[in-house]
Amino acid sequence: MSKEQVEQRLTQLWESPKTLWGALATVDHKTLGKRYIATAITFLIIGGVEALMMRLQLAKPNQALLGPEMYDQIFTMHGTTMIWWYASPILSGFAVFLVPLMIGARDMAFPRLNAFTYWTYLLSGLLLYVGPCLGQAPHAGWFAYVPYTLRPYSPAHGTDFFNLALILLTISTTGGAINFIVTIMRLRAPGMSVNRMPLFLYSTLTTSWVTIFGLPPLTAANVFVELDRRWHTHFFDTAHGGNPLLWQHLFWMFGHPWVYIVFLPATGMLSMIIPTFARRPIVGYPYVAISTVLTGLVGFGVWVHHMFAVGMSHMTMSFFSAASMTISIFTAVQVFAWIATMWRGKPVLTSSMHFAVGSVALLIIGGLNGIFTAVIPVDWQVTDTYFVVSHLHYVLVGINMFPVFAAFYYWLPKMTGRMMHEALGKVSFWVMFVGFNFTFFPMHVLGIEGMPRRIYTYAPNLGWDWVNMMITIGAFTLALGILLSIINFFWSVKHGQVAGNNPWFADSMEWSIESPPKPYGSIHLPTIASRHPLWDEHDEEKDPNNQRILDQARLTFTTTWLDADYVALASIPEDTILPLLLALGMFVLLGALVYQLLWVVLGAGIFSLLITGIWLWPTSEGQIG
Amino acid sequence: MTPVFTDESTHIEHAPPPVQRIDDTRGTYGMLLFILTEAMLFVFMFFSYYYVEKGNERWRVEEPPKLHYALPQLGVLALACLLMWWGQKQAVQRKAFTARTMLIATIILGLGYLTLGYLDDLEHQLHVGPRTDAYGSIFYTITTVHAGHLILGILMCFWVLFLPRSKWEPVERPPHRPYYNVLLYWYFLAVVWAATVAILYIGPNVYNAL
């Protein structure tokens, strides 16, 4: 067969029909990854508008744009949207798109599960926003402490939508984690042993393991609260032997590992981007890899530092204080590796590199003020003040949003086939960087001066007026910077320079194929001989006897988890509507639970089980996933 | 770009794949990870039990749950696992009738387990119900969530039971994989119930006896 015939055959096998049905039934990781990213950016914009509403209210003392109840609802929806529906899913989106390309596989290990996790993510976000659309938004903050979330204080359904949307999201996130683990451990190209894996895979893998262990306490906590709210149990009711602190423990047992879930993949992105633009391999690859894993591991042992103010023994607090400081060592290893890589290399200051270097600077500030809050006396002083708001934004925005923008400028050419506008990208970075620091650095001062977080207004003459005005101006500047990048994206998709396979001369496998990638990826599935496949002399696609085309069916390789030795062929399922139907079934089930429509719950449950049974029915080709 | 890294000592061959076998282990890995995350759910529910119990003057221990249903339930689950394990061995040897019979026996044992659990609940609710206090809430939540998982296990058995023989035995892959994956899930059910009996049943009885 000629090359054209092979390409035609592979395209027939792997391409989804360009129809509405094809769009709803696709299991293609590239399409799903882009959908994840677009949906997460939509939630970023929604959460950003909510933040601007808060800043308008706080720009001057005694403002009346938002009342106290509305302000509570807005800050709750802002935090919830940003933390859960933007920060983690945006990273999942990049991983869904990139992981199979980086490991030289044709799709994820469980493509239908991949589609299911996307649809449940989208529908969980819609479930969350049903409450606000009905005028019943949750109002207890993104960590939703009891007893404020119990019926006497939150009688409206907004809190129920919040809890049940989170349960649906945890199903999505857990499914995604299982998929990433099996994909990375079983589908790597022959030769890509663990010591040759790109660092982005280490961070995605670590995050996925953290998800498997770290999400169940949140599920348990949400179930307990819903039972207390709607079924009159007493988990948190002190009058009947319950304990409100149980929520805090369960929430932060989940919550602190979650910080690393939204943090580690972004560090993995930086570990890919910085060496490319420094024009050399990363310094200390094994130490960065080990630090990534240890950050995820030690992240389970620090949750109590969120609870120093509740009253605990000195021994307990000392242990968790020490553990919290220990974790900064692993982050410091990564930061030093990035700095050393730039120091030893010849940095090229592209837009992407601007965002990457900026995020390192912000991470250092966020890390240092985090050490302040790990010191118990300081923590007591600044708990529930704007100091903490500053810290969490330096960490989460600094090491999530800025790396994500670095990733946009780096990988969007691979996704769209067009380069982003470099000059506009740099302008966007500087506007965002200045806006961000004008927004969040003064919050340190406000916090130390005693301004509590989550107050809807404040009296004049407390010395907070001009600082708050400056923060509001900074917030709008930051929003302008983000808008510039969005404009850049839409302009570049139409008018950007054609990207080619590898516009950055990067070293990892996703750059070996066309931009945007063909539905099947590469014609010959690659073999890997080093940590930097595109910088070495090994020809990854050399296949003289055409043994690695695999055009008999939708196939890819499975390999051993340690050395990536060839094991067998994995049969990849075709497009199907079942993941969407199952996600809809679960959406209806959880939505009906809010109103206790038990017959609807039962019907949706039976429907979901039937769909699952059909989904799992094996085919003669042995398709799994 | 000039090559900056070569690793000739481990340079792999451009050899063709040695066999054309279809991998079927991904489902097992998926099941193991699903079991792991569900096991963590029970771990955190047990944590909740201990956390709320600690120093709680209102914690009910004067009428601890009786063992005369819980221990037989454990025996039933252990027997179910044993039968499924043997049935899976039969499936490997392509003895489909025996393998299916063991599945039916497991389903019957699962229903027996649920009946015993219902009787246990009826008796224990004479002293404390899920809405009585925090102890009742946690106790019944853990046992109900486990029963829910067991119902799922029964449905999995039905699913494997109805798999046509040809689906069990495609020539290019082992015949027993779905059976094996469900067996793993039943091991998980048994281990969680053993932990539940130790923590929720035996623990309070021992405490009272002391």
Image (cartoon, coloured by chain):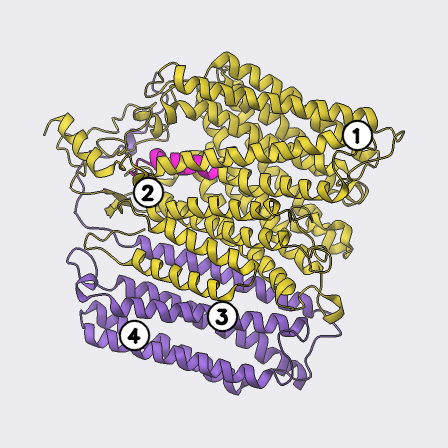
Chain colours: A yellow, B purple
Q: Which residue is mark 4?
A: B103
Q: Which label belongs to residue A415?
A: none
| N-term-proximal mark, 3 vs 4 | 4
The reply to whether discs 4 and 2 touch (Cβ–Cβ < 8 Å) is: no
Q: Chain of mark 4?
A: B
Q: Residues within 10 Å of mark 2 (few under 14, many from 20)?
A: many
Circles 4 and 2 on the same chain: no
Circle 2 SS class: loop
Magenta residue span: A91-108
**Residue occupied by mark 1:** A445
Query: Where in the figure is residue B146, as x and y percent of width and height?
Result: 49, 70
- Does B199 appear above or below A554? below
Residue B115 location (% of width, % of height): 45, 82
Image quadrant occupied by the N terminus of chain A:
top left
Amino acid type of the residue tagged 4 in the rendering: Leu
- Residue A147: tell me if it is visible: yes
Residue position marked by numbered label 3 in the rendering = B146
| Mark 1 / mark 2, whichever is N-terminal | 2
